[in-house]
């Protein structure tokens, strides 16, 4: 299987080096295997015919059968167009229009001839027309066998080079001819029987060129099932290995924790916090290594849970680290934790890229000797010079910003016994997604906000009402509050021109509020400058913080009560929710104001309405998943993680459940996949792990 499907696309008949290079650059398709897994993103139903009287503008592509009665070229020069009239059985008329290739069409379109036309119907002056329809000359009698015709994704550039869906479809036909005999079954006969699955070869044939609607449905189910089955199988195998193999330190002692609860904790933990701490404590006493994901909406109080976990480690003679993705976040965590640690006389440190060499040396020594119990920091913690006396716990905040490699570097800092791991995330992940992404982690959820927290009031305002919004800001500042104003920015392209919106915004805010001090932070600033500006805002030396999404994660300024988001249409739903989470952290009523122009699209409308309606992060994550698909949800860095080829987590939860049960059962009966009936599965796993595509990205 491997060799054949690794064949370069240029060797496929009808492709050649030029097209192969384009497909590679534009679509990331290198091999036969890549092309064959480029499934159609939709199909055209060529079995269904409509009458003109049945047409309606909401219809996507439809086909109509009729006879061409008259054609003429209208207009002059660039405005020239070809107009033809198609009359259906009932005698109703549909206008066909071409704006391009007018002369050529005029010649080839045969008058008084029966055609099937295919395109999108549009209404104009109470009549329907179809621009640039596809035509099938019925007198030519070449019957199309395909019930559903595949439509493939392409790019503008590919289309410009005449590689459109039709051309890809022809390549696919060529490929299937040679490839089908090479396709091997990837599931066991048992599974195929039990779930009544279509065999792999037929599934591949029918997903591209369905022979019937039933076969298409069966093919789709089979391929989705297989995809989800293998994701789950891999996660369960990891879990199996981990559960049986990895020993963990036992942390039973809780003397200091009890002291902390009794004498130093100034608020009552929420029910959810208590439950989560119990779950963690249980893990720490089993003798197995903990691997737990702690999920909690912004402001739900994850920091104290982190501290208590670190405290349990310290109580048992182990050191712990808390690693954050940015300087700012590490700084905030440090301030938060130090407050608690100081009350107990526990030695805690901070190590980031900007820690001075002299301080660094002291930190390194104290970590090595075990004198320092807790350390908070950034990637700087991963350096080889950072060594521990006995590292027993690693907490990673906002984990999706760290790669697997980086994280495992931390785990290896205790050569004797792997540290317990707690991963914290503020991105609420819908259940289906959590199951797929983190099937190998145990999950704890803080689903309750600390008492007395007021829901943030969210409103939508048009740009034209900016003066009123500014007045509102002024009133809030007069009451002693602080304000964030956020501008969109594409983070990957760190070009200075992208900062234009932000800079313009900064200037106009300064002009509008001459009586107040304005801070600004963005990703292009040096960490020290960013920190400095941030600290000025934290210390209330400035009143307004103009920023990009760099403030999205973690920053905690309880006195800030207004979050204005400019060009809100340019943010995703989860991102808007994350940004909103920067306010509402104190006792005061907080507000989030979403600014847009008058013209907004349908999706934007849904996003904004959702934000206005609810503060519930899980509900928002679910809607976001439906709007954007799972890849986007986790941010660009993780989008590769769930590069699902065919399954759709927002729709396929039932299949996921079945695939999950199936993979669990297979492993339960045959953990090492040694039985004869599971050899297809075993072979496929091996080919997946060497093929790297899709597979290595998951984790
Ligand atoms: P996040 O989950 O976003 O990291 P934090 O841990 O920063 O949230 O907590 C947000 C704020 O809520 C902090 O000021 C924290 O001290 C406070 N807090 C946490 N738990 C409670 C609680 N049980 N009761 C009252 N305030 C709490
Ligand atoms: Mg936090």
Image: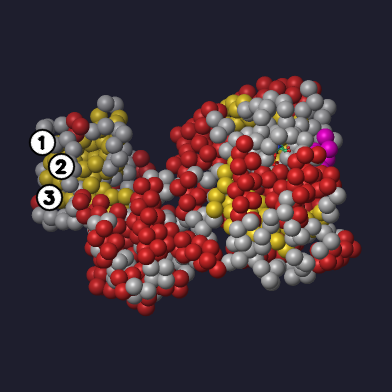
Mark earlier in primary sequence (1, 3): 1
Q: Residues within 10 Å of mark 2 (few under 14, many from 20)?
A: many
Q: Residues within 10 Å of mark 1 (few under 14, many from 20)?
A: few
> Residue 444 location in percent, x, y?
57, 47
Residue carrying label 1:
89
As for residue 227 lying within the magenta part, the answer is: no
Mark earlier in primary sequence (1, 2): 2
Task: Tell me which residue sits at (43%, 58%) in the image.
Answer: 232
| Label annotation for residue 65 | 2
Whether residue 328 is visible? no
* 598 is higher (above) or lower (below) than 150: above
- How many marks the image carries: the answer is 3
571 relative position to 316: left or right: left
| Label annotation for residue 521 | none
Q: Quadrant of ligand 1?
A: top right
> Residue 612 location in percent, x, y?
55, 28
- The reply to whether discs 2 and 3 touch (Cβ–Cβ < 8 Å) is yes
Secondary structure beneath disc 1?
loop
25 relative position to 383: left or right: left
Whether residue 539 is visible? yes
Residue carrying label 3:
138
Q: How far is the residue under mark 1 from the one under mark 2?
A: 8 Å
Task: Tell me which residue sits at (58%, 27%) in the image.
Answer: 460
Query: Start and end of the magenta stretch?
Result: 532-540
């Amino acid at each position: 299987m491997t060799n054949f499907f690794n064949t370069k696309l240029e060797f496929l008949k009808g492709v050649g080096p030029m097209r192969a290079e384009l497909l590679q650059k534009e679509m990331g398709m290198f091999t036969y295997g890549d092309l064959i897994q480029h499934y159609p993103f939709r199909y055209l139903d060529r079995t269904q015919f409509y009458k003109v009287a049945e047409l309606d503008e909401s219809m996507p592509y439809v086909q109509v059968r009729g006879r061409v009665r008259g054609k003429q070229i209208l207009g002059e020069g660039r405005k020239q167009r070809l107009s033809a009239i198609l009359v259906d059985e009932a005698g109703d008329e549909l206008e066909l229009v071409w704006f391009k290739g007018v002369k050529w069409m005029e010649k080839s379109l045969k008058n008084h001839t029966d055609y099937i036309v295919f395109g999108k119907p549009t209404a104009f002056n109470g009549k329907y027309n179809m621009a640039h329809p596809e035509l099938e000359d019925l007198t030519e009698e070449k019957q199309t066998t395909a019930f559903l015709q595949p439509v493939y994704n392409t790019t503008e550039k590919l289309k410009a080079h005449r590689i459109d869906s039709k051309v890809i479809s022809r390549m696919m036909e060529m490929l299937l001819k040679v490839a089908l005999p090479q396709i091997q079954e990837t599931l066991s006969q048992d599974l195929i029987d039990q779930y009544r699955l279509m065999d792999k070869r037929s599934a591949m044939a029918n997903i591209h060129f369905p022979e019937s609607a039933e076969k298409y449905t069966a093919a789709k189910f089979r391929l989705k099932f297989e995809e989800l089955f293998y994701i789950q199988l891999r996660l369960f195998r990891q879990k199996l290995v981990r559960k049986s193999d990895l020993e963990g330190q036992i942390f039973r002692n809780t003397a200091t924790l009890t002291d902390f609860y009794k004498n130093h904790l100034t608020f009552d933990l929420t029910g959810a916090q208590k439950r989560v701490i119990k779950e963690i404590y249980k893990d720490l006493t089993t003798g197995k290594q903990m691997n737990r994901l702690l999920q909690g909406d912004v402001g739900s109080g994850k920091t104290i849970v982190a501290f208590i976990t670190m405290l349990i480690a310290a109580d048992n003679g182990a050191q712990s680290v808390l690693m954050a993705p940015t300087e700012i976040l590490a700084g905030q965590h440090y301030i938060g934790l130090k407050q608690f640690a100081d009350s107990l006389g526990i030695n805690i440190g901070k190590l980031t890229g900007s820690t001075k060499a002299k301080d660094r040396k002291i930190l390194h020594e104290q970590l090595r000797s075990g004198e320092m119990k807790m350390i908070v920091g950034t990637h700087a913690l991963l350096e080889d010079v950072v060594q521990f006396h006995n590292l027993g716990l690693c907490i990673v905040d906002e984990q999706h910003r760290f790669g697997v490699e980086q994280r495992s570097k931390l785990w290896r800092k205790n050569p004797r016994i792997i540290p317990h791991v707690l991963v914290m995330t503020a991105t609420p992940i819908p259940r289906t997604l959590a199951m797929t992404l983190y099937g190998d982690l145990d999950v704890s959820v803080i689903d309750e906000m600390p008492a007395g927290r007021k829901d943030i009031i969210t409103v939508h305002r048009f740009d034209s009402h900016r003066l009123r919004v500014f007045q509102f800001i002024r009133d809030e500042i007069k009451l002693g509050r602080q304000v964030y104003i956020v501008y969109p920015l594409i983070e990957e392209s760190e070009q200075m021109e992208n900062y234009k919106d932000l800079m313009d915004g900064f200037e106009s805010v300064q002009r509008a509020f001459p009586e107040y001090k304005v801070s600004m932070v963005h990703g292009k600033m040096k960490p020290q400058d960013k920190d400095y500006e941030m600290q000025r805002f934290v210390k209330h030396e400035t009143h307004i913080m103009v920023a990009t999404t760099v403030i999205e994660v973690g920053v905690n300024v309880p006195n800030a009560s207004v979050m204005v988001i400019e060009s809100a249409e340019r943010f995703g739903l989860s991102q808007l929710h994350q940004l909103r989470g920067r306010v509402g952290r104190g006792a005061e009523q907080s507000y989030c104001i979403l600014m847009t122009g008058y013209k907004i699209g349908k999706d934007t409308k849904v996003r904004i309405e959702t934000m206005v309606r609810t503060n519930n992060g899980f509900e928002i994550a679910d809607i976001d998943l439906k709007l954007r698909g799972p890849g986007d949800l986790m941010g660009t860095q993780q989008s590769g993680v769930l590069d699902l080829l065919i399954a759709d987590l927002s729709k396929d939860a039932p299949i996921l459940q079945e695939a999950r049960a199936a993979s669990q059962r297979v492993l339960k009966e045959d953990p090492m996949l040694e039985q004869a009936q599971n050899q297809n599965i075993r072979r496929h796993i091996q080919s997946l792990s060497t093929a790297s595509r899709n597979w290595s990205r998951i984790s």
